[in-house]
Amino acid sequence: MATWIQDEINPGKRGWEEFYRNRWQYDKTVRSTHGNNCTGGCSWMVHVKDGIITWELQAVDYPLLEPSLPPYEPRGCQRGISASWYVYSPVRIKYPYVRGTLIDAWKEAKAKHSDPVDAWASIVEKPELSKKIKWSRGKGGFRRFDWDTAAEIITAAQIYTIKKYGPDRNISFSPI
């Protein structure tokens, strides 16, 4: 029967020491930011070992705002430093989900229109259909669907907005 005493007196059984020594070793560092609930887009240096995030540090190499001002450091917040836990969370969403009313309308529109932008226009330009989709918000009814359809809907909506309102009406997240 092994005990902790055996670990102390038998160096061959002291595997925990190797784990402790290697705790701060990593394979690579990746510059990243955290998109979930983030308003600042602060950069983080993410240290990865065996494909797993081991720890993160705030990036401190931002350009100066003005030479007469001290650097704006440190950036980052508690929400950001804990964001790597989302990657390994069992409740993390890993597939696209869409409201049932929207995907039903999309499938119907795609059957009538070969161009995805025209299909999107046929949805948003019908006041009763647009209202039905918007009023379904907050009531659940999400359905899992494929990435290609998600990309197609998003792209069609972006192009429709650019054509109708101009390119400055689309906004996306841009990390520093």
Image (spheres, rainbow, N blue to C red):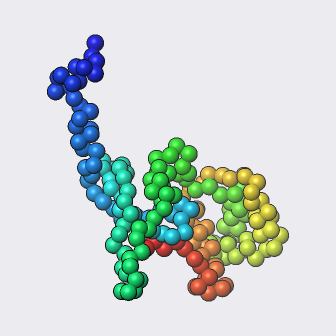
Image quadrant assignment for residue 127: bottom right
For this view, does 141 lie left or right of residue 144?
right
Task: From the top left corner, tell me how far across and down residue 156 is, in percent.
Answer: 60, 73
Q: Residue at x 77, y 59 (%)?
A: 136
User: Between residues 50 and 80, which one lies in front from this camera angle?
Assistant: 80
> On the image, which quarter does residue 28 sit in?
bottom left
Q: Nearer the viewer, residue 143 or 39?
A: 39
Q: Which residue sits at x=48%, y=69%?
A: 41
Toward the top, the furthest residue is 1
- Give the vertical position of 35 relative to 167 (above or below): above
Q: Position of residue 46 (x, y in %)?
A: 36, 58
Quadrant location, the C terminus: bottom left
65 in relation to 47, above or below: below
Q: Quadrant of the N terminus?
A: top left
- In front here: 30 or 5? 5
- Above-or-below relation of 111 to 141: below
Q: Residue 84 in the image: state x and y as whole percent.
A: 45, 53
Quarter of image, res 155: bottom right
Q: Residue at x 49, y 57 (%)?
A: 78
Q: Residue at x 21, y 24 (%)?
A: 8
Q: Is residue 67 left or right of residue 86?
A: left
Asked if residue 35 lies left or right of residue 9, the reply is right
Q: Is residue 148 visible?
A: no
Number of numbered labels in the structure image = 0
Q: Can residue 9 be seen at all in this image of the molecule? A: yes
